[in-house]
Structures are given as C-alpha cells and as structure tokens.
Image (cartoon, rainbow, N blue to C red):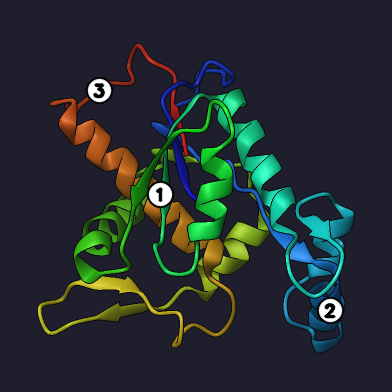
Amino acid sequence: MPARSSSSSHRSRTRSHWWVLPRFFAPSDAIERRTREGRGRWQAWADAGLVTVTPGEVVEYEAVVDAIAAECTRYDVAQIAFDPWNVEHLRQRLASRPGVGEFVEFNQTFRNYTGPMARLSEAVLQRTIGHDGNPILAWMMGNLVAQADDQGNTRPARKRSPDKIDGGVALLMAYAMALEDQADGGSQASVYDDRDPIVL
C-alpha cells in the first residue's frame, strides 16, 4: 500500500524533497513461472532481498500486514492510500494494528492522477525526488503506460501496459497524498531548506 510519512527522522539530509522507499511482495509460484517466461528478473530480485517472497500461488497477506505495520512504526506513517476495489480485508487487518496511519481512499480516476503524474515527471527531471535505485520499481515505471482522455487528463492504464505497474501506481498514489499535504500547509517553496525529506 502506498503511504506518506509525517516524519523523516530516520533519513539523513539530501538535496531531494521526497524520498521513495519501495517494498515488494510476490508468491514463490509466480516467481518461478515468471522466471521461466522471462518476464522480469524476479528470481534475481528475490535472491538480492529486493522482494519478500511468500509460499504458494498468492501473496500471504499476513506477511504484507506485518511489514506495513512495522514500517508505519519505523517511519511514523501519517497516511495510507488505498484503492477501494477488493482491498477491504487488508485494510481491516491493518486497522487493528497499533501505530498504523490514517487510511485515505484513492479512486483510480483521471482527476486523482493527472496532477501527480505531471508533477512526478517534473520532480524526476529536477531531481527533487530521491530513491534507492530499486530495479523492480524502475522496471514497473518502465512498463507504465498513460491513458489520456479528450481533455488531456492522464492516469495509469493497466490494460495497455505490457507488464506489472503496481509499484509505479503506488508511488503516484503516495506522491499525490504528499502533494496535497504540502498544498494544505500553504507553502510550495523551499519548505525543505531546513527540514529533512519526506518519506513516501
């Protein structure tokens, strides 16, 4: 689930305003199948510790809940965005854990994505968003294809994308929340001159 931290005390100062900490999960059977099919380097990523592998054909959601709850405590997560489609069971499990941030419903609409998609592209070019070079996130961002409507609004297009884009979608959702929080604070300029970066 995409999340926005209200604190960055665990991060040293960088030139970036935002810092992305991606976490990925995959079932072992799917990793074996995708490796055989040549779809991503999932086994290599798993061997490198870049993805949490759970046994079987589907992700073991209790492992996801445990990981998210731990990250919420570690990074003082303020908000967790969720797509309301087919995620209620996970949200309920997380809600029972102490220290988990506020849940914010994020519908997959042009309205919710247009601004963040444009701003994220600008942030990448201006180097105001930092990350750890995670190859899974890079692969998913490379897969992401945008869908546009007649007014030029955009959103991720899962059906048009050649492979998985979940990490890119999660990043956009977290970035949208961070931008909204920044706007609510009434300051758009240089708020991080004397502050550490916000963790996404």
Element marked by disc 1: strand
> What's the amino acid at mark 1?
Ala
CB under 8 Å between discs 2 and 3: no
Name which of mark 3 and mark 1 comes first in the sequence: 1
Direction from residue 200 to residue 84 in the image, left or right: left
Q: Which mark is residue 73?
A: none
What residue type is disc 2 on?
Thr
In the picture of the structure, the residue carrying the numbered disc 2 is 35
Q: Name the residue under label 1.
A: 81
Report the front residue among 2 and 132. Answer: 2
> Is residue 188 visible to the viewer in this orientation of the structure?
no
Q: Can residue 146 be seen in this snapshot? A: yes
**Mark 1 or 2, which is nearer the eye?**
1
Q: Compared to 52, does 14 lie above or below?
A: above
Q: Residues within 10 Å of mark 3 (few under 14, many from 20)?
A: few
In percent of the image, x 79 and y 76: which residue is there?
A: 30
Q: Residue 22's x, y, as percent?
A: 60, 47
Residue closer to the observer: 175 or 139: 175
The residues tagged by marks 3 and 1 sit, at their Cα atoms, a distance apart of 26 Å
Q: Residue at x 31, y 80 (%)?
A: 147
Given this view, does label 2 or label 3 mark the residue nearer the observer?
Answer: 2
Dot 2: element: helix
Tell me residue 79's x, y (percent): 40, 37
The nearer-to-camera label among 3 and 1 is: 1
Q: Which residue does the image show at 13% across and 26% down from the upper left?
A: 186
Q: How far apart are marks 2 and 3 (CA)?
A: 45 Å
Q: Where is residue 75 in the image (x, y as percent from the top left)?
A: 55, 26
Q: Kindly state the secondary structure of the residue where label 3 is placed.
A: loop
Q: Which mark is residue 190?
A: 3
